[in-house]
Image: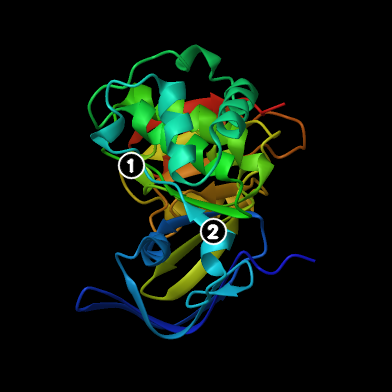
Amino acid sequence: MNAPLLRLENARIDQGERPVFAGLSLETSGDRVGLSAGASVLLDVLEGTAQLVSGRFEVAGQALDSARLAGTVHVARPWSNAFRGLRFEQALVASLILAGQSRSLARQGVEEQLDALGLTSLAKRRLGPRPCAEHYIGGLVESLLLDPPVVAVQWPIGAIDPEGWVRYGSVLARALPRRRWLVGIPQSTELPVELAWFRTLDEVVWISSRGPGMVCAPDPKQACLLVELAEPADALVADLREAEISVQALSPNSSRLLLVLPREPGGHPRTELLVDRCARFGLTLLHLEPLDGLA
């Protein structure tokens, strides 16, 4: 049985000289965990931009101060401008050689991984200056090729354009089922409409002033509605749940971006019902989109 992907016990975490959390304890149960709202600071600890001051912080059973942690988790980072001008496949091979692999092994691994992720069309493309989607996708693929037990990655919100989001998200969706992941996800109003990667997560962790909480990510094979509102909709959520309609908030302490699931397994949520309920509660509906289940 695998150790919990993430386990904290009475942890105090600072960012610079600013205390962020004190006495934080939580334990995840899934293999693909999203870190939303305040929980994304936990990725900052792995990246070294936040510090564990006291308590315990474990990833896949390895303590943060353990020498074995480096071999357990790899933080996917975007490539630097050092690779600018190289073809995408050349940059991947170079990054693996720098990590200690032989050229022949690196070339073989790159070819196989690009094919598995549907990225063969990207292989010959030359890298432009940062920030661009290829630098972020490259860092992601590099992490997979290094084959750590756990990959940690922060969604590149604000760093690339919406088209780049979709391309990055499609790669992440294909990669997530392959291993254990910690994924920092943006908060509600910044989420891209492309949610395939989100729907392959097992659970989402969030941390508010009231402490940590978790929600299960939706079944990726289940059709649902993406609903974005101009204001928090706690009353709407309560009303839908009273009608035995499953609702999951993507940012649970905000309730402005929701996934609404059908009442019957295998069915589809009723768009007109959501429009009617929003009008009844005087809510401004910004976006309503059916999302088909992922086969």
Pick the quarter of the image with the N terminus: bottom right
- The label number, if any, that marks residue 189 in the structure image: 1
Residue visible at 48% across and 17% down?
123
Return the x and y of residue 268 as percentages of the image width and height.
67, 28
Amino acid type, residue under disc 1 in the picture: Thr
Residue 277 visible here: no
Return the x and y of residue 108 as percentages of the image width and height.
62, 27
Residue visible at 40% across and 59% down?
40
- Tell me the SS state at disc 2: strand
Q: In which quarter of the image is residue 157?
A: top left
Return the x and y of residue 183 as percentages of the image width and height.
49, 50
Q: Which of 168 and 214 is in front in this view?
A: 168
Q: In which quarter of the image is residue 101?
A: top right
Residue visible at 34% across and 38% down?
79
Q: Which of 228 and 68 is in front in this view?
A: 68
Left or right position of 138 against 102: left
Q: What's the CA distance linking mark 1 and mark 2? A: 29 Å
Q: Nearer the viewer, residue 137 or 126?
A: 126
Residue 187 position (above or below residue 269): below
1 and 2 marks in contact (CB < 8 Å): no
- The label number, if any, that marks residue 73 in the structure image: 2
Q: Which of marks 1 and 2 is in front?
A: 2
For marks 1 and 2, the one nearer the N-term is 2
- Tell me the SS state at disc 1: helix
